[in-house]
Amino acid sequence: MKTTFLKSIGGTALALLVLVGGMQMSLSGQDDKGSGQDDKGSGQDDIRHKPSLVGVWVTQVTRRNCETGEPIAAPGNSQNTFAKGGTLLETIGPSIIRSPGNGIWKREHGWNEYSFVLRFMRYDAAGVFVGSGVVRAAIKLDETGDHSTSTATNDVLDVNGNVIGSGCATSVSTRFPKE
């Protein structure tokens, strides 16, 4: 148990070092002009003067029945950091069964529509790796650029990458800090 826990902590620390260390891969294929960020990383586009997704967002996620849209669990909270260049870090509350998520994002149609995909690791109560999860979402910023809504689907994967379950969710987010 102690060895498994230490391996989990080590793996998470390594993943964060890779992310923070600047080894970002711009898998979204966007350049700075296409992603809507200025050179200061403020989330404002100098040319179009439109807000972008870049920044920290406080998010409330509601898991939903994919067929009816009805909530199936109490809302949960996360914090999402969208970095200039197209990488994403999802931070969640303390959990022994799920890691934070890492992913990529890109601008879609118009100045206020985006999408992202992120992956997180799953563990059983003993801390043993049991698979991963992949979330795909479409985000829409409001007119101010300080609030957003999203719809998402997720796949639950076993240790071999086979889909063993899926789900749906919606979320509302507020930019932090709101100026």
Image: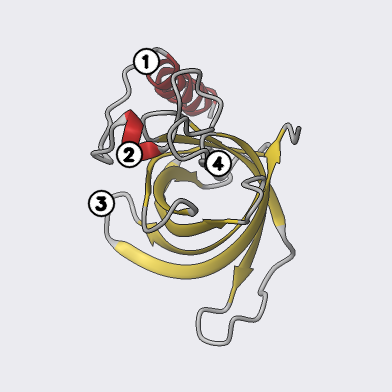
Q: Residue 146, image x and y in percent?
A: 67, 45
Q: Which mark is residue 34?
A: 2
Q: Which mark is residue 51?
A: 4
- Name the residue carrying label 3: 160
Q: Residue at x 27, y 28 (%)?
A: 25
**Front of the two marks 4 and 3:** 4
Q: Earlier in the sequence, mark 1 or mark 3?
A: 1
Q: Which mark is residue 72?
A: none
Up-down relation of residue 68 to residue 44 (above or below): below
Q: Earlier in the sequence, mark 4 or mark 3?
A: 4
Q: Counting other residues with Cα less than 10 Å from the Cα at mark 1, is it few (<14), some (14-19), or many (20 or more)?
A: few
The reply to whether discs 1 and 3 touch (Cβ–Cβ < 8 Å) is no
State how far apart marks 1 and 3 are (Cα). Answer: 29 Å
The quarter of the picture where the C terminus appears is top right
Residue situated in front as seen by the camera: 86 or 20: 86
User: Residue 94: which quarter of the image?
Assistant: top right
**Front of the two marks 4 and 1:** 4
